[in-house]
Amino acid sequence: MTVRVLIVDDSLSMQQLLSVVLNSDQEIEVVGAASDASQARTMIKELNPDVLTLDIEMPGINGLDFLGKIMTLRPMPVVMISSHTEKGAVASIKALSMGAFECLPKPKIGDDQALQHMRSVVKLAAKSSAAIKGNAQRAQKTQITGSQIKTDSEGPDLVLIGSSTGGVEALGTILSTFPKDCPPTVVTQHIPEKFAASLSVRLNGVCAPTISLAENGKLLRPGNVYIAPGSIGHLTITGSTAIRSRIKHGAPCNGHMPSVDQLFASAAKCRIGNMSAALLTGMGKDGAEGLLKLKSAGAHTIAQDKNSSVVYGMPAAAVRIGAAREILPLHKIAKSLLEKKSEQANVNM
């Protein structure tokens, strides 16, 4: 299957460069290029592309505003490609939280690894179309009917979440329904260091609990969500009655820094009464083995289902090895994370 791409960028030279980069892959065809949102709207209707590449700074409607309209009126895979995504972490996190598949810097000729990554991301984005459309429709309903979940007095003492591609939007969906007095919650999202602070600030602005970057040696308290501080190290936890976060430096695990497996495995070693954990959308298998260790330690474990995952990689790996007690769509995960569960919970297909 050939992935049909529409480029939206006000720079003619960048349109040409992106066309050359993407067309060099036999599985990708650039079907057109638009210089502004108005032209892009017309070409989307006429050409029906599989994937859109979108610049942030454009005349008239900027890229972020146009992305919002796309996700409301015609949800589709969008890869943000802009010089602003490299330096503008705030814009990048906003784009991801709005449903963009990925944010990439504009290509530099000679950086073969980055160019190949761009081509791979575009092809993977095309496969995410159904999940993006479904999540966008559910998000619109949530804005009208969504509400915070009440805290279960017999619920978990600790909540753990791991995510990657598609995870910024997924985390917003889950954490926006967490109550102000939620159990201590620890999150590892695969994200560069420069994006991590912007992610925590954005989530803190729309969620009831206090959301901040995890710090080395910090005591984990109810009503707080702690986000791994990006690629500076692995977020882990220690302790039993007094649970603290630790930033562990060293080599990447499963190709990632921070690694979900590192977080989950560290929690499995702690003597914590009740734990729940969810492994969300993402490429690869990071977190699957750690989720299995948590299950063996008596935790309630959840894998996001295929239909709601932007990329069904990490949760699929967990399902394959029997690490998940439940397999749930995104909009049901928050409630399950916060409820009391028995160790013998049945897998819900």
Image (cartoon, rainbow, N blue to C red):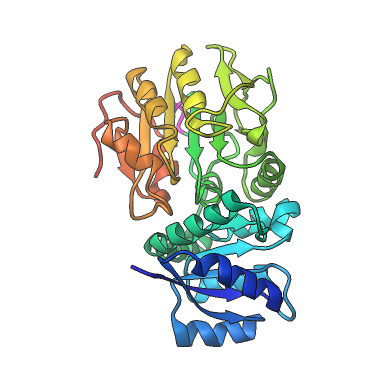
* Quadrant (top left/top right/bottom left/bottom right) for the N terminus: bottom left
The image quadrant that residue 187 belongs to is top right
Q: Is residue 213 magenta?
A: no
Question: Which residue is at 68% across, 39% downward?
Answer: 193
Q: Position of residue 280 (x, y in %)?
A: 44, 42
Which is nearer the eye, 14 or 147?
A: 14
Q: Position of residue 330 (x, y in %)?
A: 41, 49
User: Magenta region, mostly helix, strand or loop?
Assistant: loop
Which is nearer the eye, 329 or 141?
A: 329
Q: In the image, 266: left or right of 314?
A: right
Question: Which residue is at 50% across, 43% downward?
Answer: 164
The residues colored magenta run 152-156
Q: In the image, 202: left or right of 176?
A: right
Q: Is residue 155 magenta?
A: yes
Q: In the image, 85: left or right of 147?
A: right
Seen in the picture, residue 181 relative to 72 is either above or below; the reply is: above
